[in-house]
Image: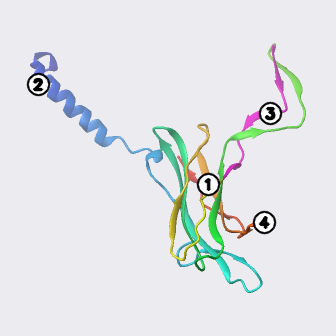
Amino acid sequence: MGTATLRPRQRLRLIVAAALAVVTLVPISASAVDDTSTWASRKHPLIATYGRTTIDKGYGYGWFSAHRTNDGLKAYPRGYVRASRNHGRHTYFSALIQYNTGRCSTGTSLGVTFAGVGGSFGNSYSCTKKFFSKEHLNSGTVNVRRWVKKKRTHDVDVDSSAARAQVKVCLQIKVHPDKCTGYTPTGADKW
């Protein structure tokens, strides 16, 4: 019995059953998986200190993920921060978002002709290198002894295939530069 001899309702059931079978066999793309990379941990946080006695400390740990959404590619630095004492220095984390596409520069401009087609090659052209630094995102400060969750979101270049963050924890100092840990890189999330 072929589909030509089936009644319309039977044809519809057969089509729906075939579509469901195909959907269950299609693998989920890597962009749908929310891989996360951690930076420090609650047990071993990054610690920023200030002063000779280092009585003021800022603590932080967290994770980073990047993936495709309905609104495009997004980077998500997340974390928990806290101060060593109430009414001490304000603590925050700063994430430098990096992804693997961007603009490179040669420093000069050259006129180039290929097969009779003229064009310029120089000052700025698209290229791929390991990671381009794009934007610093600060989490917002806290001034309490309990862990406070902070999160940020950043758009990622649509042509990239990987992103990561370089994260540091800082104490906000009013009349001096903030005191920060060194940057800690997260693993690269790929899609």
| Sooner in the amino-acid sequence: mark 1 or mark 2 | 2
Residue 131 inside the magenta-drawn segment: yes
- Left or right: residue 82 compared with residue 183: left
| Label disc, if present, on residue 10 of the rendered structure | 2
Residue drawn at the location 59% of the way across and 55% of the way down: 188
* Residue segment shown in magenta: 117-136
Q: Using the numbered discs, state the Cα–Cα distance from disc 3 to disc 4 in whole angstroms.
A: 34 Å
Query: Which residue is identified by label 4?
Result: 177
Q: Which residue is mark 3?
A: 124
**In the rendered structure, which amino acid carries the disc numbered 3?**
Ser
Q: Residue furthest bottom?
A: 53
Tell me if mark 2 has few (under 14), some (14-19) or many (20+) residues whose alpha carbon lies within 10 angstroms of its own.
few
Which residue shows up at 53% across the image and 79% down it?
43
Of the residues under marks 3 and 4, which one precedes in the sequence?
3
Q: Is 100 placed left or right of 15 in the picture?
A: right
Question: Crowding near pointer 4: few (<14 within 10 Å), some, many (20+)?
Answer: few
Q: Amino acid at mark 1?
A: Arg
Relative to the observer, which residue lies in front, 24 or 99? 99
> Could you tell which of marks 4 and 1 lies nearer the N-terminus?
1
In the rendered structure, find residue 164 and report the number of the disc placed on it: 1
Q: For the residue labelled by badge 3, is the local secondary structure a helix, a strand or a loop?
A: loop
